[in-house]
Amino acid sequence: MTFKHWTLDRDAEGIAWATLDEADASANTLGLAVMAELAGILDQLSQRPPSGLVIRSGKAAGFIAGANIEEFTRIDSAEAARALVQRGWTLFERLAAVDYPTLALIRGHCMGGGLELALACRYRITVDEPGTRLALPEVMLGIYPAWGGMLRLPQLIGPAAALDLMLTGKGVDAGKARRLGLADDCVPPRVMDNAARIMLLSGRAPRRLPLLQRLLNGPLRSIVAGKARKQVEAKARPEHYPAPYAILDVWANYAGNALAVPASSTSSLESILRSPTAKNLIRVFFLQERLKGFGKGADFKPRRVHVIGAGVMGGDIATECALRGMIVTLQDQSVERIAPAIARAAKRFERKFRGKPRDAHFALDRLIPDPAGHGVAQADVIIEAIFENLDAKRALFTDIERRARPDALLASNTSSLRIADIASVLADPGRLVGIHFFNPVAVMPLVEVVRTPGTVDQAAARAAAFVRRLDKLPLPVQDAPGFLVNAVLGPYMYEALRCVDQGIAPETIDAALTAFGMPMGPIELVDTVGLDIAVAAGKALAGTEAELPRALADRVAAGQLGKKTGQGFYAWPDGKVNKPAAGAVPAGLAERIVAPLLVASQACVDRSVVADADLADAGVIFGTGFAPFTGGPLIFVRGRQAAG
Amino acid sequence: MTMRGPIYIIDGARTPFLKARNAPGPFAASDLATAAGSALLSHQRFAPEQLDEVILGCASPSPDEVNIGRVVALRMGCGLKVPGWTVMRNCASGMQALDSAMANIHSGRSQLVLAGGVDALSRAPLLYSDAMVRWFAGWMGARSLGQKLAMVRKFRPGYLAPVIGIMKGLTDPVVGLLMGQTAENLAWKYGISREDMDAFAVESHRRVAAAQDAGHFADELVPLIERDGTVHAADDGLRRDASMAGMAKLKPFFDKKYGRVTPANSSQITDGATWLVLASAAAVERFGLEPIGRIVDSQWAGLEPEQMGLGPVHATTPILQRHGLGLGDLDLIEINEAFAAQVIACLRAWQDADYCRSRLGLDGALGSVDPARLNVDGGAVALGHPVGASGARIVLHLLKALRRTGGKRGIATICIGGGQGGAMLVEAL
């Protein structure tokens, strides 16, 4: 039997090497065909058992990216959901039961179903490279690892570590996998094949948990599950995010087997796989892939970046560029103004490269203070992040255009000025794009790529490619006030502030919106971005005559600008918010405050600020944190209309 | 001398020189060289990948950066293909890097070279004594408990006394003299008084202060930023309060009690890095470079290790002879200030007809140096002497000073522990 996606070789020692190289795909996924062929491989091996089986990837990209998520979108019935789970559960049960030793050789990403496959092997070896990453991220799609992950991961690494991985969806690198016991060894690529061979034939017993861990995974399960449930409750509401609760239930009460859960249960695979949350989160996943795709429009690999303005935004943009391997010159009026950005970068690099001080050191080498602005002449990308003043930006870009390479990408990080107004002073206005980052740069995934009617396509495409190099999501937007994200956030925050004017306590407002599913309440958000910034953004959106909410105006007049001054709507001792307990939330409060955001989102689509409604949903979710389980503001509106 | 293509100096930069303060300084040698070099390379008309090689002089790289030239080339982003190497000629290591770059450009091997010098003397290691190392070896070899107990009995607390790396480095291994003691030799030979030395040192501080105030170092300095955001923008060894009275308070350090050389009239122990970009005529044309000067000639010379401070006399004189120049034909001259006594001794040797006849093969005294043209912006007594960096710094600064003062021609020269001297004839363009 020959395979389309797999190759099966037997070496002189009788070891079978099964190599997955999914046809017509850049990464391996566990679709129907790939899994059917794996079953075929097991059939073939059962006729003449090998001395052992190694499962590895033939892709440079990684081991296995997970299940084929397209298949989830086609689940249209309870039967289809059950069939999908059954397929993986049965296959991996079969793999786990073979008589000969099995080993997964994991190089690169090993996600979801890919890790469940690896868990069904007797041994796992991780290859010590930066790209190696193991995770069960199902929960982020609103589903759960039903192909044996909920059964085998707690057995292998103990319930605490396993639940942590399954409930957060976060990944571990090759070394961490070894330390957790998820991998039996972690080796450099040069010895990986030999290590796999030696491990496979070692006769070594599969890893067994220490007694305490076995107790926690056995008779004491309910205690562990209760504790974990409390932690989950602090982060996600069951009505918004049912999957983490279901994971705990399936692990604690059904031995990790989703097939054993009665269909009527809220934890059943029928409920979970067909829940609106899963549907919306899977849609968000594909929206994210779509945003990533905008970076593929240009083959642009910038090596040198020049950033002007070493304030919080400019300094952090420069830091992210250096982190991703670019050589960055950071300009400001004096070296003293640059120094705080370097200190912040040093901290960021130390955290990012924990345990790898050399890498942290070399990242810092790539961040070059440049008070004289020499770097302009060599840069592939030049980003302006100075204060919001049109004349200053125009003067700066006039000078930059004179000194920059003709093929350099010119960009402004402005949030309140029109790109076209800045570009008008350039000899070639089509060169300038907006690359609008959000604060904090290190955390926020979205970056708006702003074009004017005159912007040349190549500049916008290169800007998006550059954003991808920072591992962020580029959203193409038109040069309209507030672009997308601030245009929808502004009316939302102002409505919240009007509620304060009407006597509703800030903490009550925030409680209403976090209950709605926002990651942070609007008043805390105003405190975080700064009250002065909120005023400026409001004026840019609504015009200078627009009346400010009194609560905002009074505090700005008193110099209470939020977190940065230690006092805004809340007190911020040591940079941490001090929030009183919320009062009873008036009915309809969250809906009232969210309503302007929903209207503004639709308006952005109507005015073609973004190309379509999907992109508005994507931008608002990734740019504001708007409750992802809703699928985004426009889907949310449509769902509400349908409901009622 | 055969006629060879010109060696152009395109640009140069250095870190502030940071005085060692009895503890490891904030930057390793490779950090200093990387910071200065990255900034310098960021404003060239060529990309770092287009360099033909990187040559770095360093007298004491730390054990994890032994070929510091290559380490720094990679850290500056020159890419995998640009070779990097390290040269060592003690105090002239930086000048040696320039000379090695010249040689490779002359031979046609290279067209565009980043060359310079660095040292972080504050990070000079404390070493285990040989006795301690032998004891360690025995301990590692001891297998049984009995053997280990025997080793414990052999241990002597004296083994723990560290060998101070920098004292080793500043001691001549052939004649066993500290560098400061060789300066005492010269002071004795030429009758240089404590007051002569102290006055020279005070003047060095005065000149550095004046140059700082006038911004004469600004265009060669790359400010450094520590991880915590602390900025080092200027040379920090300068004592603006330097005075004869203050100098008089210090005790002789090298010949205790009876000597004349003190820490204050010697160069400071300092961390720093200097780089120059050198190019052939072909590279100048290819990249459209704008040279600021050229290195016309260079010379190395050897002499008695115990009189190493006269090295500049022996290295400079043959260059002057080759080009038919006298001391008065130099618009400026930089003699590295390892010791005030040693610079004064050089000036006296050139005025000494006997010495010039017997040691330099001249007919009589070569002449005198106009103090107004010597170390116009001060020297290592006030700025410090990060050993490997100094030879490159004086070449760079000489050129900058020539351009500023409208001068044309100058010599930068340096004495070298072990009994050598190095010199370079530079022309401003």
Image (cartoon, coloured by chain):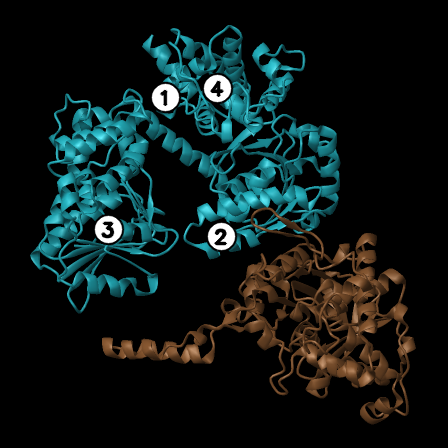
Chain colours: A cyan, B brown
Q: Is residue A635 left or right of residue A466?
A: left
Q: Which residue is drawn at 49% across and 38% down?
A: A442
Question: Percent position (x, y) of residue A611?
Answer: 51, 26
Question: Both on one chain, marks 3 and 1?
Answer: yes
Q: How crowded is mark 3: few (under 14 residues within 10 Å), some or many (20 or more)?
A: some
Question: Both on one chain, marks 2 and 1?
Answer: yes
Question: Percent position (x, y) of residue A519?
Answer: 41, 25
The numbered mark, 3 or 2, whose residue comes first in the sequence reads 3
Q: How crowded is mark 4: few (under 14 residues within 10 Å), some or many (20 or more)?
A: many
Q: Please, what secondary structure does the residue beneath circle 1 have?
A: helix
Q: In which quarter of the image is the N terminus of chain B?
A: bottom right
Q: Which chain letter matches label 2? A: A
Residue type at mark 1 is Thr
Residue A522 — which label?
Answer: 4
Residue type at mark 4 is Pro
Question: Both on one chain, marks 4 and 3?
Answer: yes
Q: In this view, does B210 lie to the left or right of A448?
A: right
The numbered mark, 4 or 2, whose residue comes first in the sequence reads 2
Distance between mark 4 and mark 2 Cα atoms: 35 Å
Q: Which residue is drawn at 51% across and 10% down?
A: A500
Which residue is label 3 attached to? Answer: A181
Distance between mark 3 and mark 1 Cα atoms: 37 Å
Q: Can residue A641 be seen in this view?
A: yes
Residue A630 — which label?
Answer: 1
Question: Percent position (x, y) of residue B358?
Answer: 83, 94
Q: Please, what secondary structure does the residue beneath circle 3 have?
A: loop
| Above or below for A427 versus B88 | above
Which residue is label 2 attached to? Answer: A360
The numbered mark, 1 or 4, whose residue comes first in the sequence reads 4
